[in-house]
Amino acid sequence: MKKSQLKKLKCLNATRQIMEMAKKEVPKRNEYDNQESFSRGLFMRCQVEKGILKVSLFLTRDLRIGSHRPVYQVFVDREARDFVTWDSVLEKWRGAKVDYLDWPHAFWGTDRYMGPKDNKILQTYLGVSEGGYKGLLEYQRKIREEQLKKRHKKQTDPWDRYLEQVPELPKDWDHWVDKEGIGQNYMFYDYSRKKNQKGYCSWCEKEVPIEKPKHKKEGVCPACGHKIQFKARGRAGSFWTDKRYVYLLQECRDGMVLREFRAWRCYKKGEYENPDYICQEERRVIYGDGLAARTFYYGLYKKRDFRWIETSSLSYDRPSVYWQYFKEKYEGQLYGISLPDPECRGLMRTGLAQFARQREQTDPEQYLYHLRKKPYLERLVKCGLFRLSEEVYNGKADLKIRESSDFAKSIGIDRYRMKRLREHDGGSVYLKWLILEKHQGKEIPDSVIDYFSGYQIEPKDLGFISEQMSVVRIKNYVEKQHKLSGRPPKELLSTWADYLSMSFRLRRDITREIFFKPRNLLESHDEAVELCGNKEIAMRAVEVTKKYPDVDKICQSVKEKFEFADRKYRIVAPEKVEDIMYEGQALRHCADSSDIYYERIQNRESYIMFLRKAEEPDKPYYTLEVEPDGTIRQKRTVGDRQNKDLEDAVVFLRKWQEEIQKRLTLEDYRLAKESSRLRVEEFKKLREEKAKIWHGHLQGQLLADVLERDLMEAVRSAEVGDRNLGLPGDGLVSGNLSDRSEECIKQEEQETEQKEKLVLAVAA
């Protein structure tokens, strides 16, 4: 339908009869929303013009105030099987059915009126059983249903044509599924005290002699030799077997198709010889070149009907209606793996048949997925490396493959070690030990590799001790400690590494066997924990000192220079990394956990100091970050806060800054100058990035503003020129600064201060 032509059609306005009928309607107030409603809420007219059915809809409320024009005009083209609606209020076209147009709330539940003559026209034109509103809606729904099916067929028809290549099931398929795929068989018997009894075997499907049966007891059929479960007919009732997955691989036009079924048997009470057999196909995967796959599952399509639907999911990540609420394994029996001429010849080119023979159940789709990603999986299977191939199949191993015609060299070993790997059914851990052995050029006994791989211990797990002990000695030591403590060997290695790290922190010589190989590992570990005070802090301290090796030494070197006390307060310098960590944990701020402060200490950009009350010198109070000249960057207490009690301590901090000026050297001032420059650059960068604080009581504030408010710059004492600041090569006479040197320093200080103020002003 052309909308431009529809707009040229004559508008059907309300007739005099409709207007009079509307005026006779008595309005009623709705008790819920206080809106007016009528027994007839809608009046309708229709007419056929130029082959188009025009239906005008009038609201009673509009008619009662004298409006003749319809609120909606519906145009229906019977030949085109389409309709469209003109909204007279909004003056736009609408594609909705009449029940989805915008109606007042009071409209619903009222009658809709159309005259007998118009009803007949509408029924005849639309070919519907009812007239008026219901007939129009019935037709619109039918049209929408047809359009929806047509739209769906555009998607589903290509699927159906593609799936036409799936061949018929093998003739013995149902028999194989029933006997091999489901895999659960029973021996039904009647309870009797007679010695000579008979039972019905569900696999043999005949009566066989049995001895001492017991309900639900496992056994073997004396005739066919299959495993069975005894079921007393009087107690079995109705039941069904587990639902088992079974798979079929067949050749098809594009390559091969993997078909997944779920099968089970239902036994009704008293009818155990004739169970109901169910086998439902649920999934199809068609593989083309390079194992490129297209996957389909049987499910509810668009909430309408059940059919084959294409999906991109893997077998173990299914989004359809059946599997979206839980995960499960999709392993089952694979048809044809024991046949000399399998149903699908392509199956033999994957290694899947050999792999499936080694396992009770397999998920072929999972195997083929990993085979596509890791083509070496087929070689692993065909070389007899089943444990290694199992790990690749489960996604637990990913081998580094090198270019070589010799597969042993491809995986990093040689033929001799390949033979050992196969004989010991080694996995990826065993392979890593063989690769290490080949690299070192020294053979590791099989018993050692078996022991380590049995506990999933890799060569890298011994990195902390391998330079001091051979793998044989390590294995013997771990084995001894395992017998002594009962702890798993891999856990003992972790304990051993922790112990050595703590011993290193305790300044022990861990190159000596008495320390690196304690007689009782757990006792020595616990002793080290007790000496360190806190295992987590000790381990963290080891990490920090390895990364920033000079932190402890620097903390101790500034201790005498920066410590100071009066009657109320004192400044305490930490002696080692652990002191800073304990302080940070006690006050719950970031000084202990953030590497930035250790990095600044390492670079002598700033130091960490502790502000304590004189009467409680060991109790954490405030943590300070100070520059080499005493400038205080940050002052933080519990929860990274500053409380009102700090105001009283500020006087002491100024006093401390003045005092330490007497102790500083030219090197300290040089470091302070660089520290000041870095601070100004950091503030500028923070302002450019508009960095904010996202947590805590300062949340939402600009970080640069907070840091600037916290800053307490040191004021250098006039006595600095009268002190002994002599350093080798400084050109100082008798240890005192010359007048010119003092003048230069003051001039440099003034220039630096001016630059800092200028940069801060620009940043602000």
Image (spheres, rainbow, N blue to C red):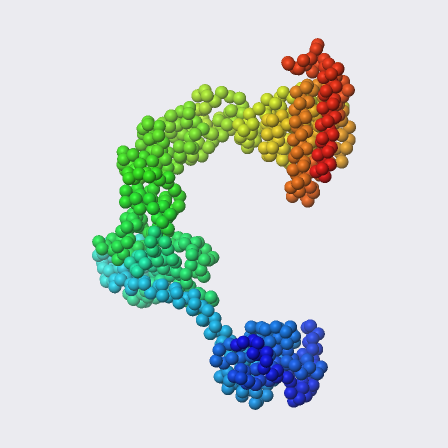
Residue 746: image quadrant is top right
Q: Nearer the viewer, residue 530 or 657?
A: 657
Q: Nearer the viewer, residue 26 or 16?
A: 16
Residue at left offset 45%, top offset 71% = 149
Residue 197 locus on image (x, y percent): 24, 59
Residue at left offset 36%, top offset 44% = 391
Q: How many marks?
A: 0
* Visible residue check, residue 640: no
Left or right, residue 8 beside residue 512: right
Residue 398 locus on image (x, y percent): 39, 42
Residue 158: image quadrant is bottom left
Residue 471: image quadrant is top left
Establish if 549 lies above or below 452. above
Residue 344 locus on image (x, y percent): 27, 56
- In the rendered image, the quadrant that contains the C terminus is top right
Left or right, residue 646 beside residue 578: right
Residue at left offset 73%, top offset 25% = 749
* Visible residue check, residue 72: yes
Establish if 676 lies above or below 396. above
Q: Nearer the viewer, residue 762 or 556?
A: 762
Residue 544 locus on image (x, y percent): 55, 29
Left or right, residue 494 beside residue 692: left
Establish if 357 lies above or below 526. below
Left or right, residue 745 beside residue 273: right
Residue at left offset 37%, top offset 66% = 160
